[in-house]
Image: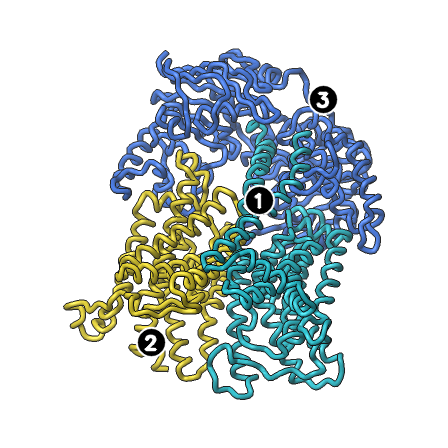
Chain colours: A yellow, B cyan, C blue
Amino acid sequence: MEMLFSYGTLMAGITLTVPILLAALGGMFADQANLFNIALESFMLLGAFFAVVGSFLGASPWLGFLMAGLAGILIALVFGVLVIDYRANTVVVGIALNMSAWGMTSLLLELFFGVRGFLIDPRIVSFPNLELPIIKMIPVLGKILSGHNLFVYITIIIVVSVYIITYQSKFGLRIRALGQNPDSLETAGLSIRRYRYLAVVINGFLCGIAGASLTLSGLSMFSENMSAGKGFIALAAVLLARGKPTLIILASIFFGYAEGVSIKLQGFGLPHQLILMTPYIITIIFLFIGTRKKHARIGG
Amino acid sequence: MIIVKKVVKNQLLLEFIKYFIALFLGIIIGAILIILKGENPLVAYYMLFKGALGSRAALAQTLRWTTPAILTGLATAIGFRIGVFNLGVEGQLYIGALIAAIVGYAVPFANRVHAIVALLLGSLAGGLYALLPAILWMRYRINEIVNTLMLNYVAYLLTEYITRHFLMENSVSAVPKQIVSPEIANSAKLPLLMPPYQANIGFIVAIILALVLSYLFFRTSTGYTLNIIGQNPSFASYGGVNVRRLGTVAFIVSGMIGGLTGALEILGVHHQFAANFSVNLGFDGVLIALLAKTNPLGIIVVGFFWGILKNGALAMERMTSANKIVIQVVQALFVLFLTVDTGVVKQLLAKRVAWTKGVHKDGDAI
Amino acid sequence: MPGDIIFQAITKRFPGVLANDSISLTIRAKTVHAIVGENGAGKSTLMNILCGLLRPDSGEILIDHQYKSFNSPRDAVKAGIGMVHQEFMLARDLTVLDNLILGYEPGSYGLIKREEARKKLQKLSTAYGLSVPLDCKIGEIPVSFQQQVEILKVLYRGAEIIIFDEPTAVLTPQETRGLFTAIRELIEQNKTVIFISHKLKEVIAIADRISILRNGRVSGELPVEEATEQKLAELMVGRKNFLQAVPPVIKEERAPLLEIVNLRVTDQAKIVRINDLSFSIQAGEILGVAGVAGNGQSELVAAIIGWGVIDSGRILLNRIDITTSSVRQRRLKGMRYIPQDRSMIGSCLSAAVWENLIMGYEFKAPLARRGLLNFTEINNFSKKLIGRFKIKVASQDMPVQNLSGGNLQKTVIARELAENSTVLLAEDPTRGVDIAAAEFIHSQILQEAGKGSAVLLISQDLDELLSLSNRIIVLYDGRIIGESIAGEMTKEAIGLLMGGRCNGKDGVDK
């Protein structure tokens, strides 16, 4: 039991929260633009791969970060063109993109690095861990707040920015209005298409760097199909939160923490599969509860 | 009205061109990927087809892969018919496979009845696993896409958990690949079509099922009703159809076919359940159903094509330095390119629809 | 005068339809100019052109003697034009304030300065006597307030010319009076108002000048002093006495075919929608139901056809209790329904004509035997109906989304009346269809009653109710607030009851 709340589990939980949280925040924008995006997984995977490529080429995690973001944007634009301009079914495009991203990254891994399956190389540079001066000295809390990978702090900055964008910016207001009633946007003389594309681009960027956080926050490696369903956990968070950043954060932390616990359990040979199931089961339960509530409200 | 007729007539031709272009583009990109690897794409593709159809053994192995392709295609197609996205075929397949494996080794039977019971229970388990998303969607209108997706992961983990902790004879290993159930009894194994190759009676089951569904979809009242539900459930319900009941039944049947696919895989090919044994068979079904436009006879054709690609890819990888994953990318791109074109046509038609809709909503819009 | 809006020979063509045929029109500044016309006359097209949503094929718009061409609604807003749409363009979960400023948010660096907006909005709302709760969510405030939000939104964007598109469709008479007060206030403040409507009485009450559109052309224009309802109706329709249906007289007491006994329905939020409602309809009788939409009509229909959940009460069809029967069981007993929403409920737009016609008959002889469809019989069946109901289609394999509104409605009616009915529910059966089709539909309904069916006619169109019904009940708040037999109640009296007034004078007079 105490293992659940041990320092190690907590730190692992924070690290595991990062990719889910970033991807979910990205997915939130697409969701607000009424785009049901199950391709978060592919955005992440591509981001993870190009983060490694960038870091390898530039010997700098920042180049990896940048390339991951760009790769995410690029594949998101493919999604956007098909879904927004050609009105293709989002689910079908999502499945096809997930399949191609998996295949493509595996093939590119072989082409670029001449290896199959996975790549570990000292030339891939991760972000460093960061000891926060002063804060580090605070008893208990200092140990929790300080000493994380730089990516954790980048994530915090991004979370705050997303919060401000959603509630305080013109873009945030418009994208929320778009989700609730596209006509309200159109009659204000704003282009729905433009805002959908913007949402998709942000979605792509955040999922891309979510992928980078898998490869560049300490592990410094890439393996085939590395995202391994994290995109779907992020999607679960998106659907639970329905456009509310606060709920996205809470859900992501919970899911990340559950994963941290399950890894610990696995180490002891305990049934970690049951813990790993929780995000999915919780999503189903909460969607059920949420829908019941909504029905009651609409009735009035 | 004349314009409309022309549009409809040209559409068949358009459709054909569209498929051709999409596949062609997919193949070209595949060829580029093969060239980048330093291999001649013509040789690679030749090896693919030779490896898929060039010999008795090759054909048998192609049919082995055609079977799950047809079945998952059919499972998804039933959902599509009524406007339901059952993305959980993968999960239903796992549950069906696990149950079939358990019945296959743990229940003592002496004869062929064993295999039949295992198949039935496997498909029943798949159907039961679809019951939850079916009820959530039909009764409470909770997005079935999300629920079925989530339940896939629950199925992966649940089957792994059960196998690891209850079925494994020697439960030391923790690596997923090695988490396996005991082998099933000989009485539960399916007869092979072309011994000693893996193609088995499951292929015949798949073909028969496709024919039955084709008859159901196009010749019966139920088929008509399913089709209408898929297009406008409110209208069906207004016409006296019990949409909820029929929709739930169709959803469960879809899950049963998913379960059957899993059971056939175990009883016909693998002979034991292994955690994570099927990679994406369920999602292939979505693409296949889509390519065949939910027509069961079309699914046989596309399923066979899928079998050729899947088996041929393995041969290609054996015979050349090209990676078999190239073919997976070609398949995904084929569908992706197809959505592009469908989009264009749809947009053209959508404009017409929008226009007609405008008339219904408010005559002034015209 | 400065500020006048001049339309010069505006023409707009849609595939197969000439929506605006060289319309020329002058709207004087600081007046209320009404544009009336039937559905399909071209009003909305003209206004969509004025507010930048559509571009004309030819013709010019002049404002203040300057040529204007709008590429987007934003251009129109810049030119001082604002439109209060029929369906409100509001986001439910955003606050009133956020909805008001959407697209025109004050602030810099992409951030919003809400306090600045609030001050400006408060000033505006005091100036025009509009009071809206800025911090409530749109979904939480009533419809009439939402309309005020729309008006305030237009003013916030600096509109000088304000278009109201069928603004009273969603309002009670009391709320309509409030709206008219607001419109007069706008004129006081030197705004110009364009008022789109087909409700002649209201137009006469509010407008200074009235233009009438018919088939995409201006068929007349006159100052309000010269306008009478009769005159406007003639110009709108193009011929006199367009509705000549006369309700049949029921002489003897016959068997009641549909009986509603103490029906009570509450919705999921526990609000009573139908409260202890009882009535019956006898064979051959047409019972009209009047009432502002949302006073229990849809719940009543749902209860009768078997869609809704009811709390208590009984429904009898031909003296048999059908309270718990399914839709199919009721249909098998001869219940038929022409729904209000013919494109989403009454038909399957993407399906073929024959597929639409056989719904409800597809499982039984002669169209099917032991679950198998008989395509020869189906072919005969739909051919016969297409002929009998004069549906204009190129082929019965064509999807019905290609049919015109009138033909689509005929398809619905053909299916519902393919066999003799016991009870026929008709909800706004002629809304949005052309007059020839409307007359045909009316004759079919009368014929069905003549054959001994009990008809429940629910309509927003009082003329339709008065000319078809033997008896009329008025629904208000889920209760029958008034009842009369044919010819005894005037339109005005019904109108008053619809607003919830049992006595006393109310309305929209000037």
- How dense is the environment of label 3, judged by Cα within 10 Å: few (below 14), some, or many (20 and up)? few
- Mark 1 vs mark 2: same chain? no
Do the residues bearing badges 2 and 3 touch, measured as CB atoms within 8 Å? Answer: no
**Labelled pair 1, 2 in contact (Cβ < 8 Å):** no
Residue shown at the point (56%, 42%) measured from the top left: C477
Amino acid tagged 1:
Thr
Label 2 and label 3 in one chain: no
Instruction: Spot the residue most to the left.
Output: A134
State the residue position of label 3: C244
Which residue matches tag 1?
A: B342
Helix, strand or loop at label 2? It is helix
Tell me if mark 1 has few (under 14), some (14-19) or many (20+) residues whose alpha carbon lies within 10 angstroms of its own. many
- Residue nearer the viewer, B366 or C389: B366
Quadrant occupied by the N terminus of chain A:
bottom left
Mark 3 element type: loop
Between the C-alphas of marks 1 and 3, the distance is: 50 Å
| Amino acid type shown at disc 3 | Gln
Horizontal placement of A130 versus C486: left or right? Answer: left
**Position above or below: B244 against A7:** above
Tag 2: amino acid: Thr
Graded by Cα atoms within 10 Å as few (under 14), some (14 to 19) or many (20 or more), the crowding at tag 2 reads: many
Residue in front for this viewpoint, C366 or A232: A232
